[in-house]
Amino acid sequence: QHLEAAAAAAAAIASGDTAMLEQQLKVATKDVAEARSAAQRLKMAAAKRQAELDDARLELAAEREQAKAVKAQLMEAQRAARAKAAEEKRRDGDAGDAAMAAVARDAELER
């Protein structure tokens, strides 16, 4: 298409046809304007996509931070549960020891 336009322009110059040259200039000017407009639309679409990507990255970072906080809470809850279980086991052991000591005292008293 560009080659055809260049060939037509060369023919118009050779023949001295200024009306044809003016027409070629109008078409070329229109083509340039359309190309610039399309480039601007593409640039705007790319900027929009970049903004969407940036928003998604921020959202993902916030979700990661939230996941870290939840994980920390879970680990703390697990630690507390283990500590409680250990305390209950210790108390059960103490109660068992006390019961055995009472049985031994009772047996000693019966003698």
Image (cartoon, rainbow, N blue to C red):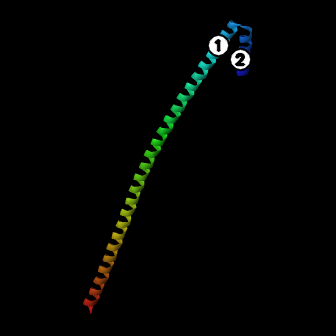
Is 66 left, or right, of 95 in this rendering?
right
**Residue 97 image point, x, y percent:** 31, 80
In depth, the one of 2 and 48 nearer the eye is 2
Residue drawn at x 51%, y 38% as measured from the top left: 53
In depth, the one of 57 and 111 nearer the eye is 57
**Residue 88 image point, x, y percent:** 34, 70
The N terminus - image quarter: top right
Are dots 1 and 2 in contact, CB under 8 Å?
A: no
Find residue 5 and name its label. 2
Q: Amino acid at mark 1?
A: Leu
- Can residue 1 be seen from the camera position used here? no
Work out whether mark 1 precedes mark 2 in sequence or the reverse, and give the earlier one. 2
**Up-down: is 37 above or below 67?**
above
**Up-down: is 23 above or below 1?**
above
The C terminus - image quarter: bottom left
> Which structural element holds mark 2?
helix
Residue drawn at x 25%, y 89% as measured from the top left: 109
Residue behind mark 1: 25
In depth, the one of 108 and 19 nearer the eye is 19
Marks 1 and 2, how far apart at CA: 10 Å
